[in-house]
Amino acid sequence: MRYLYTLAMYLVTPLLVLRLLARGVRSRPYHRRWPERFGFFKAPGFSGSLWVHAVSVGEVNAAEPLIKALRRDYPNAPLVITTVTPTGTARVHQLFGDSVFHVYLPYDLPYSVGRFLKKVRPRLALIVETEIWPNLYFACRRRGIPLMIVNARLSGRSMRGYRPLRSLARSALRCVRQIAAQSRTDAARYRLLGADPQQIVVTGNMKFDMPIPEGAVADGAVMRGRWGPLRPVWMAASTHEGEELAVLEAHLQVLKRLPDALLLLAPRHPERFRVVEQAVRSLGFAVGTRSNDGAPSPSNQVFVIDAMGQLMPFFAAADVAFVGGSLVPIGGHNVLEPAALSVPVLVGPHTFNFEEITHLLIEHGGAERVLDSTRLGPDVLQLLRDDARRERMGLAAQHVFERERGAVQRTMQLIDTLLQE
């Protein structure tokens, strides 16, 4: 099965190259670095590195407290961080600068993987959340590199996607020394996929250990003072194509009852910042942007946050937060950022990427589900007009966030054991 998989990977390689060229048109820095996807880059000249793979922004954010713990406990070990997307790369540089070595993960081709491992020479490999790459996993086992899936998550959709390749996935998972699962549900799915039950430990979700940026609450308070502390403000974060129009229609409904309301709108992908801003202007809203104006003014009806990694101060300044990727079948995004700041959370029907976290928040009263796009406006309006309900929801959300912390410490104990071996 692995030979057939590898043959298929080689057959689609021309399409992968075309995809790289297409993405390079949108992101020139990514275009210059696409040889890294085949293992071609300058070797950093170290050995015994600790390697963390985080696909994109969400995984990088989840891995942030773990990477900081690795730097603290193993200060002499070089740290290698791999990502797949340009936005993930930007987030790595924003968080860690030159203190880590970043390179794009190679495609799962035997020679590309071999070149990569030969150059970074890892002592330990940590894969964040979901990724299963058979050739990479087998290569680590052949070289005696302990491999661990941390913050391991396996959604029902991913489980179904692996079904045609179940025997291959099972063989790949047997190359893994440890699976640190987010929840009992994730652990059960890994067992069904073929992982050895002895490999699996439920450590919790590292997203609960995310640090709240220093000054985020104070910066939010300053913004509220600028536009008026009593002004109703809601935020739509990490929105995707197909959601912004629903959000703007919801804001029109809110403005009919609360004419001074402000919408903070944060599209998920940087390449869509300009498109979203133009869409907002075309609908006649008074618009400000993070890049041009810094912070909202009293005259803005909509403020587009066209910047990466800067959402926390805006969450702190909002009364209500809608988290995107959930009105369309993307699977939702991180609901813990507003929860950590005691902000009530609204989500759409599609939250399978954050299934356990969303369920916890809803179960304990810190979040509510919007059934469809037509309900977003009325649901936001109800919360904005009910101070007591918002306060109850915010406190409940923060309570869940504080109670579930500790996954990084439990994961580090497993890592320490592997490194001592």
Image (cartoon, helix red, strand yellow):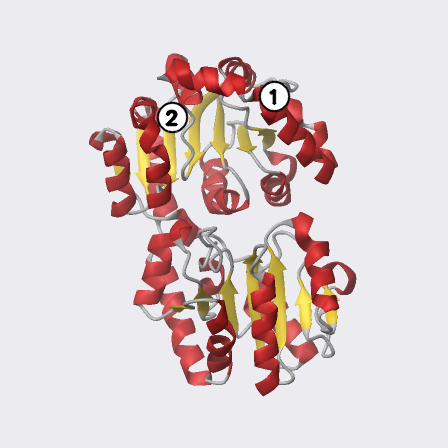
Vertical relation: 362 (above or below) 159: below
At 35% from the left edge and 17% from the top edge, which residue is drawn? 1
Name the residue that disc number 1 marks. 14
- Nearer to us in this view, 1 or 32: 1
Q: Is residue 25 visible?
A: yes
Q: Quadrant of residue 310?
A: bottom right
At 63% from the left edge and 39% from the top edge, which residue is drawn? 86
Sort mark 2 into few (<14), some (14-19) or many (20+) by Cα contacts within 10 Å: many
- Amino acid type, mark 2: Leu
At 46% from the left edge and 15% from the top edge, which residue is drawn? 7
**For residue 147, which numbered disc appears in the image?**
2
**Mark before the other along the chain sequence, 2 or 1:** 1
- Amino acid type, mark 1: Pro
Image coordinates of residue 218 in percent, x first then y, are 60, 68
**For residue 234, which numbered disc appears in the image?**
none
At 33% from the left edge and 60% from the top edge, which residue is drawn? 359
Vertical relation: 178 (above or below) 56: above
